[in-house]
Amino acid sequence: MNNGLTDIPGIRVGHWTDPEAGTGCTVVLCPEGATAGVDVRGGAPATRETDLLEPTRTVQQVHAVLIGGGSAFGLAAAEGVMRWLEEHSHGFDTGVAKVPIVPAACLFDLPVGRADVRPGPDAGYAACETASDGPTAEGNVGAGTGATVGKLLGFGQATKGGLGCASRAIGKGVVVAALVAVNAVGDVVDPATGEILAGARRPVVGGFVDSMKFMESALGQTIHDLARRDSTTLAVVATNAQLSKAQATKVAQMAHDGLARVIRPSHHPFDGDTIFALSLGDKQADPGLIGAVAADVLANAVLRAVRAAESLHGIPAVRDLR
């Protein structure tokens, strides 16, 4: 197994990365179609085509999911994904043309590198060109390139975030997998020990501030000015178990528990936390079990993301702080 989304047959993952500009995008290609759901928990999302994934909507399958940097500007990268899919004859058949369905979500990474360079249509197209069903790169790649965590003391005290993957086989051929770009306001915490792995760094003395305790001591008075930007954790979870749109939506909802276990605080008003869930295949499994495992796998992917990250543009990574 590749320990990522590509352990699900029918999925390919590709990246476009610009380390100089500190941004990038990641495409999850499922060109033959995947049943999909979504759950948006953060208070400040930048999203596209999420309404279409509501279970009562007509279209039943998507052909790709894009996550990336660039804030709302980065949503333009989905146009390039659509162009690539159309050129390869994938999409919802309207009778006169095939229309690719590409939900997308973007995170705020504009303070890292150059704010005037964002993923656009060419970046989305390039990510499709690199997509493969092999192991997925982690850390400073794709949507994780400019990701940071721990911004309650301001961006200057943040720690580098990144992109992480994980998967688990749960018997009878069923696999659940996750990919995440970690760019949270809060800290990333190891749930096994309670240790802060990455977060808001203490000035001068070093180490990490406990963001929750800081918020409590400040009574929220300074949070609006310090944390109103630079946030959002985006994820895609997938399984080869057969799910309906409603069941995929429930899996996306349950997967958010994984973020809450390892990011503190999570789903902040200045985060745009969004999780997409994809179902490809005909394996039979209880949707509740799939959702519970998705939360576990996603939590693991978050930890892998910050451990794989590298320092960039003056923002130190965990590996350089120990």
Image (tube, rainbow, N blue to C red):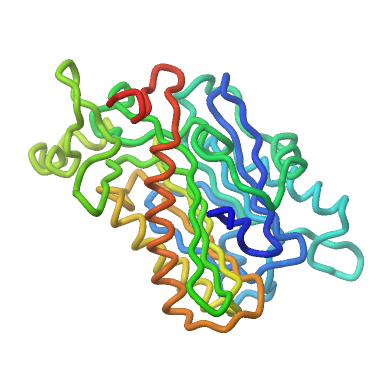
Placement of 23 over or under 281, stated as above or below: above
The C terminus, quarter of image: top left
Quick one: 297 or 255, which is closer to the camera?
297
Residue 183 x %, y %: 41, 40
Q: In which quarter of the image is residue 240?
A: bottom right
Residue at left offset 30%, top offset 33%: 151
Quick one: 192 or 160, which is closer to the camera?
192
Q: Which residue lies furthest to the left in this view?
A: 217
The N terminus, quarter of image: bottom right
Residue 111 x %, y %: 45, 24
Residue 175 x %, y %: 54, 68
Residue at left offset 59%, top offset 34%: 24
Residue at left offset 76%, top offset 50%: 82
From the viewer's perspective, tell me whether residue 198 is left or right of residue 99. Answer: left
Residue at left offset 53%, top offset 56%: 236
Residue 55 x %, y %: 56, 76
From the viewer's perspective, tell me whether residue 86 is left or right of residue 194. Answer: right
Q: Which residue lies furthest to the right in this view?
A: 96
Q: In which quarter of the image is residue 130?
A: top right
